[in-house]
């Protein structure tokens, strides 16, 4: 299967099964903006909940925050985004298409769309922030920006969080929230979009301990990705060379994933030094120092940042899970999502719509849902077709109520991956499914 085909197949499966739809599709779509359907939102929530649990709930040295998307415009002057958050843009004078000048596909000077040579304009800086106006008057004084990262909300609230939560350095602030970037070359489905969600954590440390904390976070983040069930051989580190470093970073490493379109960034881990806090001190005139209570020592902490996209994590889990295989001479498409992140944990089928089977199946379905196990009821089509639909949706367990169930209250449970079927007592199902989901989470990486 060619890799380009995999992306096309994934995009159509995502639509067919209710994972991801193009935004405003009936109007022809909005450029590189996507909507999450019934299964997509469940996968996204599972990813976010696991991140939040590992970052905030399971640790006592990280606090949560939900800062607003709109911030004081001076924030973005201080952070360097107004002057520096730009990509070099060139335009082809033949077809008027625009490209990022730093992309390899235009390095030979040939337009990848119309094929013309030597038709690119000189590169000019293009700011990626979306601008809008606050209040009724559209003038320069009222310009505000949609945040291009959540991190700045954590910096401007550094002392609010530290003091209210009575934290001591080292400690971190975690946020999950929307970010917006007017990307010149978005694409590859939800890999690079103009509206996306980030999971970012800023860890404040004493200068001099930053290199050690950087290494710790680099290792921890890799473990987290593995805990989603992602294959180890598809993940690697990419250390940034001096020419790749962002203006604020002392050191940076990406965790990369091998997408069907090649090895690319999945998460960024950055040592941002005291750059952001110092700049906010300068621009706001307010002190952002940390004062150690026992010694009275004052310093501006260094920041180790871990930054990953929710949408990009969803894409990685989908790419990693997609497979096509033959079973008894039949082709099947499977989303082999780990049970602990799969949107639906179990599907319930009555073998036929009579002889008391639908009643038992409905009761099982209701029991599972009441126990907070997301389950799906399906009574239409042959059992084979019902299995195929759930294989594509990524559902790990299919429960079938058959003739024997009406006699002894047992059902068959079919495993999506091994295809093994076992008989389980109907009143044990909630525990049985819960145990399997927990086991999968443990096997993939402990409690995180
Ligand atoms: P790139 O250079 O690839 O545009 P970046 O290095 O600027 O990305 P960061 O600013 O480090 O990215 O953002 C942190 C994370 O947020 C990325 O690793 C990625 O997971 C996610 N992310 C960034 N931009 C986008 C986007 N346009 N669409 C989806 N996710 C994004």
Image (cartoon, rainbow, N blue to C red):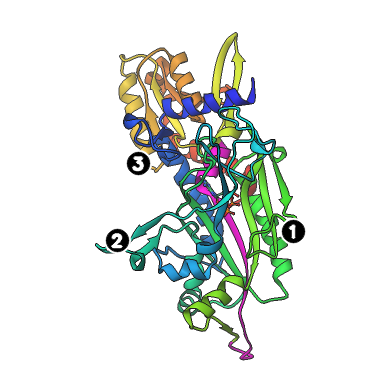
**CB under 8 Å between discs 1 and 2:** no
Of marks 1 and 3, which one's residue comes earlier in the chain?
A: 1
Q: Is residue 294 magenta?
A: yes
> Which numbered tag is attached to residue 242?
1
Kind of element beneath mark 2: loop
The x, y position of residue 16, in whole percent, is 42, 25
Q: Is residue 250 above or below residue 359?
A: below
Kind of element beneath mark 3: helix
**Could you give the CA–CA distance between mark 3 and mark 2, rounded to whole angstroms?**
51 Å
The x, y position of residue 19, in whole percent, is 43, 33
Q: Which residue is mark 2?
A: 138
Q: Which residues are magenta?
A: 293-317
> Which numbered tag is attached to residue 370?
3
Comparing 61 with 366, the one in front is 61
Residue drawn where x is 58% and y is 25% of the image: 6
Q: Residue furthest top?
A: 329
| Occupied quadrant, residue 275 | bottom right
Count of labels in the image: 3
**CB under 8 Å between discs 3 and 2:** no
């Amino acid at each position: 299967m060619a890799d380009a085909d995999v992306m096309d197949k994934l995009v159509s499966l995502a639509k067919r099964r209710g994972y991801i739809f193009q935004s405003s599709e009936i109007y022809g779509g909005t450029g590189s903006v996507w909507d999450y359907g019934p299964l997509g939102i469940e996968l996204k929530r599972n990813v976010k909940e696991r991140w939040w649990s590992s970052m905030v709930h399971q640790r006592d040295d990280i606090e949560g925050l939900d800062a607003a998307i709109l911030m004081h415009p001076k924030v973005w002057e201080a952070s360097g985004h107004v002057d520096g958050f730009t990509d070099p843009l060139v335009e082809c004078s033949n077809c008027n298409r625009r490209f990022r000048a730093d992309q390899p596909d235009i390095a030979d000077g040939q337009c990848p769309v119309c094929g013309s040579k030597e038709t690119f304009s000189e590169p000019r800086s293009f700011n990626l922030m979306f601008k809008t106006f606050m209040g009724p008057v559209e003038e320069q004084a009222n310009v505000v920006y949609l945040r291009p990262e959540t991190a700045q909300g954590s910096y401007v609230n550094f002392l609010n969080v530290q003091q209210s939560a009575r934290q001591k350095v080292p400690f971190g602030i975690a946020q999950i929230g929307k970010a917006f970037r007017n990307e010149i070359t978005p694409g590859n489905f939800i890999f690079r979009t103009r509206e996306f969600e980030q999971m970012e954590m800023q860890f404040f440390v004493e200068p001099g301990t930053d290199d050690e904390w950087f290494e710790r976070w680099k290792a921890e983040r890799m473990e987290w990705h593995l805990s989603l069930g992602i294959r180890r051989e598809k993940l690697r580190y990419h250390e940034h060379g001096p020419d790749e470093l962002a203006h604020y970073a002392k050191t940076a490493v990406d965790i990369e994933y091998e997408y069907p379109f090649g090895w690319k960034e999945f998460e960024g881990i950055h040592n941002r030094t005291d750059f952001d806090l110092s700049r906010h001190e300068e621009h706001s005139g307010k002190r952002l120092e940390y004062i150690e209570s026992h010694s009275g020592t004052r310093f501006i902490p260094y920041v180790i940042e871990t930054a990953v996209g929710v949408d990009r994590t969803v894409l990685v889990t989908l790419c990693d899970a997609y497979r096509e295989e033959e079973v008894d001479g039949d082709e099947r498409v499977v989303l082999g999502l780990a049970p602990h992140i799969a949107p639906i944990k179990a599907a319930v089928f009555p073998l036929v719509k009579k002889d008391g089977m639908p009643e038992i199946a409905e009761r099982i379905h209701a029991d599972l849902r009441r126990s907070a196990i997301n389950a799906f009821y399906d009574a239409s089509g042959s059992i084979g077709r019902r299995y195929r639909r759930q294989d594509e949706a990524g559902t790990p367990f299919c429960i079938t109520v058959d003739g024997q169930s009406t006699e002894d209250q047992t059902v068959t449970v079919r495993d999506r991956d091994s295809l093994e079927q076992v008989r389980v007592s109907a009143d044990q199902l909630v525990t049985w499914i819960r145990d399997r989901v927990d086991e999968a989470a443990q096997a993939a990486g402990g409690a995180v």
